[in-house]
Amino acid sequence: MGGYLLNTMNYHISQRAASLAPSLTLAISAKAKQLKAEGQDVIGFGAGEPDFDTPQHIKDAAIRALNEGFTKYTPASGIPELKDAVVEKFQRDNGLTYKASQIIVSCGGKHSCYNIMMAICDQGDEVIIPAPFWLSYPEMVKLAGGKPVILDTTDATQFKVTPEQLRAAISDRTRIFILNSPSNPTGTIYSPAEIKALGDVCVEKGVMILSDEIYEHLIYGNAKHQTVASFSSEHQAHTIITHGLAKAWSMTGWRLGFIAAPEPIAKRINAIQSHSTSNPTSFAQKGGVEALRGSQHHLKEWLPEFDRRRTYAYERLTAMPGVTCVKAQGAFYLFPNISGTGMQSTEFCDQLLERSQVAAVPGIAFGSDDYIRISYATSMANIQKGMDRMDAFVRSLHS
Ligand SMILES: *Cc1c(COP(=O)(O)O)cnc(C)c1O
């Protein structure tokens, strides 16, 4: 009843919505799920979230809050207790001083980034995004009426943009430069000196830096994270840090992110949030307080495990003919170059899934078609099996 009309009527769709590219990562995981449901033994390297459970003490804090009736609206920008915990986090981990009025808690790190675009971009304003990029950045910029300006990088520079490259891309319409270190999808971490040099250019040119630091704590080997905001008060004044609990506390489903911004920007984001989502879920915020203030012991177990998987996957990938890989030191991704197989990323991933039942995300989703993204947020047994299959698949292309 009515179904025919619903499917054929010509609905008006805003240009804003029509211009959005649907998420390719979600399409891949849908296809992998479908194959699994059909009884196929699919190995998934597509995950954008840790395979570990949220630590119990964090769950307990949220359950306690729920049982105590902490189930009503909170201030739109988050409860004071959580903002204070975020202020403490920046002081403790980054040596940065913020006031609670500079902190906005949002419904995930993605929401934080979106709010920033909405607060800063006017029609036609430019946002500089290094590629490979987290696939939501350009779409968010477009939603806000802005224009994404993509800076291409390759594995030859470990996917890092240079200060010269950044400087050349800045115009008088440039409002924001997006820096995501450690990076999704490449795992790349910029050194403190490299970060400072990029920050210097932005300070000089009056461009705001959106520094997405959600993978701050997922770092291996001798790499070091230093936030661009930490180099001087000028750098801090030009930086909006976005962060969240999804990755290092394995709380993707809780939807909790936060920003630290100059106060005038934080105020506008508060206004935007007060008319769109209102507050992040009340009892989830209590879990967030526990995540930031409670034991961080879980990372002592997770980091060595991620590191073991990273090294193993790296060694397997680099032994495959036609595949090269940077041994990235952060997040839980590797971004191997598969162009030596003669295929582009979409065809490679389609065939890998169909012929070998291994799901990976084509690099084209992140703006770089010579690569695929391998997430090692899955068990060692899965990684071994998936790498065996991928190795056989790649070798079959060469025989
Ligand atoms: C996962 C992720 C986020 C935020 O995810 P949420 O689930 O919205 O908190 C932000 N930036 C990058 C680069 C990510 O990979």
Image: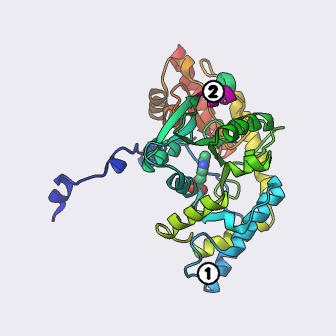
**67 shown above or below 15:** below
Q: In this figure, which residue is indicated by the disc labeled 2?
A: 165
Quadrant in the rendering for residue 375: top right
Front of the two marks 1 and 2: 2
Q: Which residues are magenta?
A: 158-168
Q: In this figure, which residue is indicated by the disc labeled 1?
A: 66
Residue type beneath disc 1:
Leu
In percent of width and height, residue 204 lies at 69, 38
Q: Residue at x 43, y 49 (%)?
A: 143
Nearer the observer, 84 or 223: 84
Q: Residue at x 48, y 21 (%)?
A: 343
Q: Quadrant of the N terminus?
A: bottom left
Q: Which mark is residue 285?
A: none
Q: Secondary structure at mark 2?
A: helix
Residue type beneath disc 2:
Gln
Q: Secondary structure at mark 1?
A: helix
In percent of width and height, residue 387 lies at 62, 32
Q: Earlier in the sequence, mark 1 or mark 2?
A: 1
As measured in the structure, the alpha-carbon distance from the residue carrying label 1 to the one carrying label 2 is: 50 Å
Nearer the observer, 177 or 133: 177
